[in-house]
Each structure stands twice: as structure tokens, then as C-alpha cells.
Amino acid sequence: MRFVRVIPFLWSRRWNITRLVIALSLLVILAVDTPARLARLTLAALPEMDYAGEVATLREQGRFAEAIVIADAGLAWTDGPGNGPKRAEIERQRQMTVDEQASWVRRAKDVGWGALSGRGESLEQLVGAIAADMFVVGDIRDLVIQGGTWATGGEPDKLIVALSAVGIVLTVAPEIDWAPALLKVARKAGAVTDGLKDFIVRGVKLRRTEALAGAFGDVTKLATRASPAGAIRILRFAENEADLAKFAAFAERNGTRGGAALLITGREGAAMVRGEKAVAGAVRATDDVVLAAARKGPAGARFLASPAARVLTRPHWLLGFGKGVWKGNVPEAVKQIARAMDPYGWWLLPLMGLWTLCECGLFVGAGRKELGKSRGVTAGAAITPVPAN
């Protein structure tokens, strides 16, 4: 009988219950999202990167290709109202970089030096080194140098020897050959880790052509998005072929901004990308954090090393409900709503708590009132006299 009485009571308080569910849901969402909200606010409070200044610095160092990559990313990131003067300065610095890069005297000197030494910092030196490798001359040069090292009792570089052998074999396929050539330049610059070196040497020995082709393709993707010189700098953070594949995939997903983000955030950004989990939502979350941090320059890179950055790489907990949620725009909508609420979280959270308490009070008060009525009716029925016949 009591259960029968509960149903009409709940129906009579349906709007109260509906408001309570809404308030409680908003309270839980805001409470659970508090660490991520504080992390987003911390990142947003960091000053924006000085793109024009960074481009000028890279140009003075002769790193023209990287300077252009940063300039292009800066122009993309400042594409909005109120950024006219900032964009104009970035465009001016970019044009100065292009003009200086186009100096024929310097280019000829750099190309020649790169071809002779097999090393390179600027794009032209890399072109010279790679061109020599693609015409076999560079591969033979490196084999002779390594052979001389061995003949004099030294230890030849196994990676240089392996890549030179690959380069000679692939001379008929220049679209593939220039990746091994770039790796040789990177090795001479100390940018190839032991793990990646062992993978390539072992692949050449065992003729694992598919695995090597995949790694060479990843190098090509990095060089396309971050410039050849930029790719060499990013290679320093690839401990193995899996890391290389993740860096290349990140650059491919995010275009020029992806390559620039890896260059700007350096080791911290590479560690974030390297540690991403291949699950729905996690990859996109990692991309968003690294790209946002890159817009803050060195300060953003330092932020990526903090625990707060790890909080932001976790997909929102609401996205775990239902497999179908991944098929639409719900994940992006949840992220946008959460970000829009960030500035107001300090007062929304206590407001939702107060609303929840009020709705709970109304519900409990109505329940006590209903219980009082039931007891009154029961007591009245108990003392009602039975009429005599």
C-alpha cells in the first residue's frame, strides 16, 4: 500500500524532481571538470608567443626554412579581428626571411658546402647534401669516409653505412632516396637516437623493406610539414620508429601548425605526443593541448611539462556514455560547452550546489507533508466510532 501511495506522490512532484536532476547533473559536471577547467584557465592566461620575434631570431641563426614554418603558423593562429598589426609584422619578418634566403651567392656557397661535407643546417646545405646522396656521389663519399675510419682502427658509423647502402640501391627512385639522405645528415648532426638507429640498421640487414619504407615515409611527412631542417630537430626526440610515426601523424593531422608546434614546444611537446593513447578522443585532446601550448611559446612548452597538461589530455568523462556518441559532433560540442563555462566556473559551481540544496529541501518538505497527511488519516480512521445497529 505504501508503494501505491509513492507513485502519485512522485508524479505530483515531477517538476521538482526534473529540476533536481538537472541541477544535480550540472553540479556533477562542473565539479568533475574542475581540474581541467583550472588547467585551461592557466594555459589561457599565459601570454601569446611573439611570432615575429621568433622568426627574426631564427633568420639571424640562418634557420630560414624553420623561420618560414613558424611565420606561416603564426599567420594562421592570428587570423582574426584585432590582429592586424601583429599579422603585418609577422608578414614583414617572413618576407625579410624569404629575401635573405633567396640570396644566390649565399645559396651557392651553402649548396656546395653541403655537397662536400654531407652536413647541413640551412635548407641549401641540406639540398646540397641530399643532392649528392641522390646522385650516388654522396653515398660513395660516406662509404669511403667510413671505410677510412675502419682502416685506421676507428669504429665506423653503422647507420651511415646502412643508409649509404640503401641510398645506392634506391638511386633509381629519388622520391624515396632523399629520406635516407636526410637521415644521414641528421645522424651526422647527432639527431638520430640509438633506438631509431638500431631499427634502421636491423631493417637493412634483415631486408625489412616495408618497415623501412614506412619509417622513410614518416621522415618525408615531417620534412614536408616542418621543413627538412625542422625535421632533423624533431628527430632528436624519436626514441624509436613508433615515436617517429606518432610525430609524423601529428604533423599530418595538423598541417603546417603541427610541424610548427613540434618545433616550438620541443622536448615537452614531443613527450606529450609520444605518450598519447590511441583511443577515441585522446588523440584529438592531445593535439589540442599541444597546439594551444605552442601558441604561448616557451611558456606553453613549460606548461606541457606540468601535471595540469596531463589533465587536459584526458577525454571528457561524459564521452564514455554510449558508443554512438562518437559518431556525431557530441564530443566537440561537450568540449566547446566546457570551455565556454570556464570563466564562470567560480560562481556557477556554488550556484548549482545551492540550487541542488533548494530542490532537495523542497522535495523533502513535500515528502514530510505527505507523510503527515497519511498519519493523520490513519489516526482518524483508528478512533472513528462504529455506529450501533
Image (tube, rainbow, N blue to C red):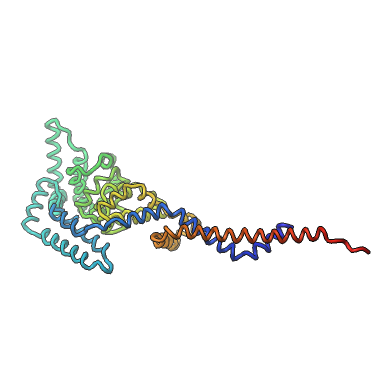
In the rendered image, residue 348, in percent from the top left (x then y), is placed at 45, 60
Looking at the rendered structure, the number of numbered marks drawn on it comes to 0
Identity of the residue drawn at 25% across and 39% down? 194
- Report the side of 294 relative to 121 (left or right): right
Measured along the vertical axis of the image, is residue 383 above or below residue 168? below
- Report the side of 92 relative to 370 (left or right): left
**Farthest residue, direction left:** 105
From the viewer's side, name the closer residue of 24 and 118: 24
The quarter of the image holding the N terminus is bottom right
- Report the side of 331 relative to 209 (left or right): right
Res 332 visible: no
Give residue 240's quadrant in the image: top left
- Report the side of 134 relative to 299 (left or right): left
**Farthest residue, direction right:** 389
Res 365 visible: yes
**Farthest residue, direction top:** 153
Give residue 76's quadrant in the image: bottom left
From the viewer's side, name the closer residue of 136 and 383: 383
The quarter of the image holding the C terminus is bottom right
In the rendered image, residue 377, in percent from the top left (x then y), is placed at 76, 61
Identity of the residue drawn at 21% across and 38% down? 158
Identity of the residue drawn at 67% across and 61% down? 369
In the rendered image, residue 360, in percent from the top left (x then y), is placed at 58, 58
Measured along the vertical axis of the image, is residue 180 above or below residue 12? above
In the rendered image, residue 386, in percent from the top left (x then y), is placed at 88, 61
